[in-house]
Amino acid sequence: MRKRIIRLSVISLLFFAFSSCNNPPAATADGSGKTDPAQLKGSTLNILCWEGYADPVFTKAFEEKYGVTVKGTYFGSSDELVSKLQNGGGEAYDIISPSSDVAGYIVSNGLVAPLDVKAISQWDSISPPLRNMADVINEGKVYGLPFTWGPDYLIYDADVVKKEPDSWKVFQNPIYKGQVSLWDDISNIYLIGQMDGMDKTNPAALYNMTDDELNQVKAQLIAMKPQIRKYWSTAGELNNMFKNREVALAIGWPLTVASLNKEGRHLRAVIPREGATGWIDRLMITKESKNKALAMLFLDYVSQPETMAKVLAVTNYNVSNPGSERFLTPDLKKIADASQYFDRLNFWQMVKRRKKYNEIWNEVKSAQ
Amino acid sequence: MKAWFRKYILLLPLVIWLLVFLVLPYGYILVQSFFSTDSFGKPVPGFTFDSYKQVFSNSLYIATVFRTLGYAVIVASICVLLSLPLAYFIAFKVRRNKTLLYSLIALPFWVSYIVRAYAWKIILGKEGLLNGFLQWAHITDKPVDYFLYSTFSTLVCLVYILTPFVAIPVYAAFEQIPRSLMEASKDLGAGSFTTFRRIIFPLALPGIISGATFALVLAMGDFLAPLLLGGPKTLFISNVIQNLFGTSNDRPLGSAVGIIILILITGILQLTSRYEKKFSSLKADN
């Protein structure tokens, strides 16, 4: 009897505990498949994207125009996106924003639907090199609208780091022990490879390392651990760490610098002498989307020069429509001037041994 | 047949529930653990022990399992040490408002886990309340890094989250002890401590073990605390599993690790329930 009371009390407690957990209500999308905008009214467009890609600054006008809701869900790494798509996420999301490392895989595995480029009025204004990239073109059909591109910057807090670092090796400087944050992602393997000059002759070397190379990279990442405060898993988390002065140096995206400096902080971003990796993000429509018509309208809307300018203002990422330039403030124009660093970026490519890369990264994390 | 049916129909909803949401998923995980995958993680049905071989050949998995078990033991022990005096106080020292105090233990459950984990960031950070206080009191002259983004902060959070799971069964166990036994002990000249050590503690041991088991198992399976509050060295096995399912997308390997943990946890539960029975010495219960 006594034990039964104990058991019952604990079990009721368990229910209590779990019922107070956050359960976001599942949003359902019910598109009509027709282009008559009036019929789309009231539906929800679900976007699975990198942070900053569903910001109200530019989605609000779209919502008002069509009387719909745009709901953004963020993913923290390319692997997370692929995993979500493969595990049935395609139905829950209409638009995704894969980067150049997984875009080709997503297309060739039939996870996305071809785009009707004629419905994108600005298609011909999109920067041709981005528009013609082969990885998202399959049998003459286009699967991705080029959206943004940018670097994985070396970000530093100018209040703490007084001199601009000129090398990624600043992460290993004992002065900054416990003040560095790396991304919780396999891209740290590219970072070390780049630090070692592995990609000087062949950019693809970072994405095709041998076991020996991977083990060397692993040893270096483990040796760096005392320098690390925390591996960040979302841009929001990194922002918070800079905000609370938990870290002074990190690898991260322009978005972090943009949002923190808007709050009066002094973050700076550089591409060190070894260069940096970069990414090209495309917008795609999932194969199972029930809102394809609305999704196409969104792609058309987002590729307008004026919208693109707003995207740039929010994220500080370079956008794919050069026409956006005339809507930019002089400060943003400077940021958008890609000529200064486009050539110094090694753009993410598909990693064939992704599982191995992920395991190496987990081994780094588990090392004591 | 009819009588049998009438008797067990009450159980039917639960049986269906367990079948659909427990037995089938576990069965699927077991089956999946023998699959293989392509490089991006699409499971390829088949029958191979590769995932299990990988679990046992790479120290990442087994070492992390046992390190997590170690953390869980620490958390459960601290929870017990905190719960004993608390439950003792409410059970034996408080006369009025007992129910109120008892329900206060459960009060933290009104706030979601994530919010409570975030609260620790505010307390333990470099510019947090604790460091602020220590510097204000001139105990330290610069912020202590180790408070946040470390194994320490992870364990602090888990102890905080899991203590009610121990305190409530311990309290229930204390309440069940017939007061006559304690009075007899005192009449025979034993002091409070001796009474606790020789009467209360042994009689409450089943409750303590069951509470500690809950804390142990829940800590073992936690991944949010290490994710939000852990440092570069804090990695629980659930983080690895979460990564295998959500990032690396190697579901067969994740399933294999899951099955091994399932076996381990089942073993722990068997062991503790045996000890619970062994120490249930108060036979004349009611």
Image (spheres, coloured by chain):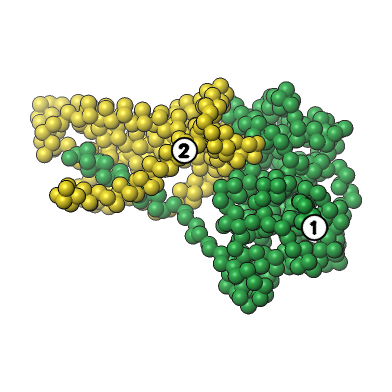
- Residue B59 position (above or below residue B154): above
Residue at point 61%, 39% (across, down): B41
Name the quarter where the C terminus of chain A is drawn. top right
In this picture, residue A87 sits left or right of residue A168: left
In the rendered view of the protein, which quadrant contains the N terminus of chain A?
top left
Q: Residues within 10 Å of mark 1 (few under 14, many from 20)?
A: many
Say if residue A89 shows up in the picture: yes
Residue B144, compared with residue A76, is above or below; it is above
> Residue B247 placed where, x, y %?
60, 41
Instruction: Pick whichever, A262 or B269, lies toward us.
Output: B269
Q: Residue farthest to the bottom? A: A38
Residue that appears at 40% across and 43% down = B24
In the visual, does B195 lie left or right of B132? Answer: left
Q: Mark 1 points at which residue?
A: A319
The label on residue B29 is 2
Helix, strand or loop under label 2? helix
Residue A218: x %, y % from top left: 68, 27
Asked whether residue A226 appears in the rendered view, the answer is: no
Which mark is on residue A344? none
* Mark 1 vs mark 2: in front: 2
The x, y position of residue A234, in whole percent, is: 63, 47
Front residue (pair B51, A79): B51
The kind of secondary structure element at disc 1 is: strand
Chain under callout 1: A
Chain B: its colour in the image is yellow
In this view, which residue lies farthest toward the right?
A339
Q: Is residue A212 above or below residue B265?
A: above
The amino acid type, in three-letter code, at marker 2 is Ile
Question: Can you give x and y, in whole percent of width and height, for residue A136 in the image?
Answer: 76, 51
Q: Residue at x 52, y 31 (%)?
A: B47
Given residues B147 and B79, the one toward you in this image is B79
Q: Which amino acid does label 1 sit on?
A: Val
